[in-house]
Amino acid sequence: MKTLKNYKKLFADFWGYHEYDIPICWGCNRQQAVDIHHLIPKGMGGVKNNRLNRIDNLFPVCRSCHDHAHREKSINEEWKAKLLKKISDKEWGKLYNE
């Protein structure tokens, strides 16, 4: 369970959430995001050195969207583009706020 906490902490730290905050799902924008979905799946048994626990691979979702993402793999590409835009916007915001 240690890796679970590591990537949730990585996500919370990057986006400025407290570790107990529950953001809104970035998939449907309606429900609480109770899961962090790996856009590139970790696969069974994990990945060496947790290399997929990166901010550009972590997407907060509700249970319904998480289930949908595992059934309909094509949604991951849409969410990846959405995530990269959010990261880019955040980085540009930091430049203007400093």
Image: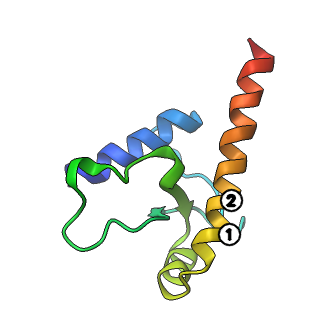
Q: Which mark is residue 67?
A: none
Q: Nearer the viewer, residue 73 or 23?
A: 73
Residue 38: x, y in percent?
44, 62
The picture places residue 8, in percent across and down from the top left corner, at 40, 47
Q: Residues within 10 Å of mark 1 (few under 14, many from 20)?
A: few
Residue at the extreme right of the image, as rendered? 96
Which residue is located at x 31 percent, y 43 percent? 6
Q: Residues within 10 Å of mark 2 (few under 14, many from 20)?
A: few
Q: Looking at the figure, which quarter contains the C terminus?
A: top right
Q: Is residue 16 left or right of residue 28?
A: left
Left-right relation of 15 to 97 = left
Residue at 72% x, 64% y is 29
The correct choice, above or below, for 17 with respect to 50 in the image is: above
Q: Amino acid at mark 1?
A: Glu
**Quarter of the N terminus within the rendering:** bottom left
The picture quadrant where one finds residue 61 is bottom right
* Label 2 sits on residue: 81
The residue where tag 1 is placed is: 78
- Does residue 87 sit above or below 82 in this rendering? above
* Residue 69 seen in the current view: yes
The CA span between labels 2 and 1 is 5 Å
The residue drawn where x is 21% and y is 54% is 48
When the figure is inspected, residue 84 is found, relative to residue 15, above or below; the finding is: below
